[in-house]
Amino acid sequence: MNTNFKRLPKHIGIIPDGNRRWASDQNKGKHEGYQFGIDPGFNLYELCLELGINELTFYGFTQDNTKRPKIQTEAFQKACVDAVIKLANRDANLLVIGNTDSTVFPKDLLPFANKRVSFGKGLININFLVNYGWHWDLEYSKTKERNEEGNLYNTIASSDISRIDLIIRWGGRRRLSGFLPVQSVYSDFYILDDYWPDFKSDHLYKALDWYQTQDVTLGG
Amino acid sequence: MNTNFKRLPKHIGIIPDGNRRWASDQNKGKHEGYQFGIDPGFNLYELCLELGINELTFYGFTQDNTKRPKIQTEAFQKACVDAVIKLANRDANLLVIGNTDSTVFPKDLLPFANKRVSFGKGLININFLVNYGWHWDLEYSKTKERNEEGNLYNTIASSDISRIDLIIRWGGRRRLSGFLPVQSVYSDFYILDDYWPDFKSDHLYKALDWYQTQDVTLGG
């Protein structure tokens, strides 16, 4: 595929779904799927660095997800921690966003939570949603000073995450599942039926190839 | 197509896009497309009554849309008014939601704005977004009494609109364009390439046929 794109998104949102279905297909336990989601994330990161993408947001896990069986919850918590430890050896500015006032938020990620931390040359902004909840994100504004002049965007918990141009979801579901409702209002959605652990570069290129044909109107 | 669906959405969101592109294809002025969007809405309404759908939300126009040329703005304002006048002779509970503190909000719709009005037998809830803005909707909570115990949902301007199960968009764009960010967090999206004035019943049936194959997890 021609990877000279005439127009690239500045910020891509990643919904890496299908880890459990992938694991079942491999005759593994569902919880085993999450570890196989780490390398795909780094492959995607490398491709985005090459392309010069400014910002990437990964859906780690949500408050909703923590209703799942304990073995799964522990597995995706561990996968998130392992991903961050690995990223700490790369070049990125990491922002972990999520509700830290809960025992399900991994303690190992507290040093990276709700403030951006630079690794290496800081070549790209990476946002990682960990114990994130859309309701928690929007409700956060209540804890800020009420200001009639203020911009709503400045009062949500995820206010340091910019508007998302393109959201790519793996695993075939055509929904946001609570992914950053404010940043997603104008995003283009690209859905892949493949499961996230089966990520290949062609997935990203197909999404970008489609994206460059879309207009950007911001509702106008 | 078999229209005995095993699972139906309670609430369907309608993004009736493509009126201008349809008009251009017909060698009409772009602004002429909007009037051709009214009958499709009533065809859809009839089909949903037959199926027993509880609630329908139509995207009329947004605050963003009013940046368009005056001839277009006036045309979609008139189409919204005409649609409501026609609906007043049917059986529905209408709620018009939008920012009425603006001259672009059609005066004729003020009697129906921001409170539900019953027509005839009131067989279905119809929500109509008129001069709606996602930012206006979320910002609205600032005008309500701040209450730490309160539910965010109760404080948004569109709090009388329930969670949306299925969003159907005509005109091929794969985005929300600011459509009810809170109610859309778990919605399934179905996109049709056809332009809205070319609506046919098969579009709805195809969307419902797809919808019944989707699971409902609410992020869990």
Image (spheres, coloured by chain):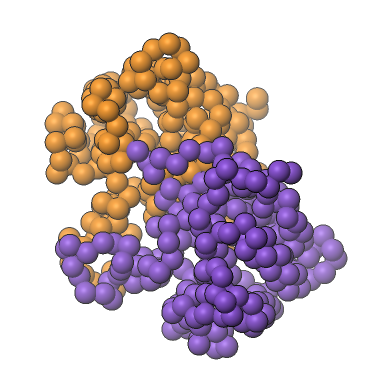
Chain colours: A orange, B purple
- Say left or right for B43 vs A38: right
- The residue closer to the viewer here, A208 or B44, is B44
Up-down: is A174 above or below A19?
below
Q: What x and y, as percent, mark residue A21?
A: 45, 23
Determine the residue positioned at 65% across, 25% down: A1
Q: Quadrant of residue A120?
A: top left
Residue A182 position by quadrant: bottom left
| Residue drawn where x is 29% and y is 32% of the image | A68
**Which quadrant does the N terminus of chain B fall into?**
top right
Q: Relative to B140, is B32 on the left or the right?
A: right
- Residue A190 visible in this rendered orientation of the protein: no
Quarter of the C terminus of chain B within the rendering = top left
| Residue at 74% in and 63% down | B197
Q: Position of residue B76 (x, y in %)?
A: 65, 75
- Residue B117 shown left or right of residue A72 in the figure: right
Q: Quadrant of residue B34?
A: bottom right
- Image coords of residue A110 (percent x, y): 15, 35
Q: Residue at x 22, y 64 (%)?
A: B150
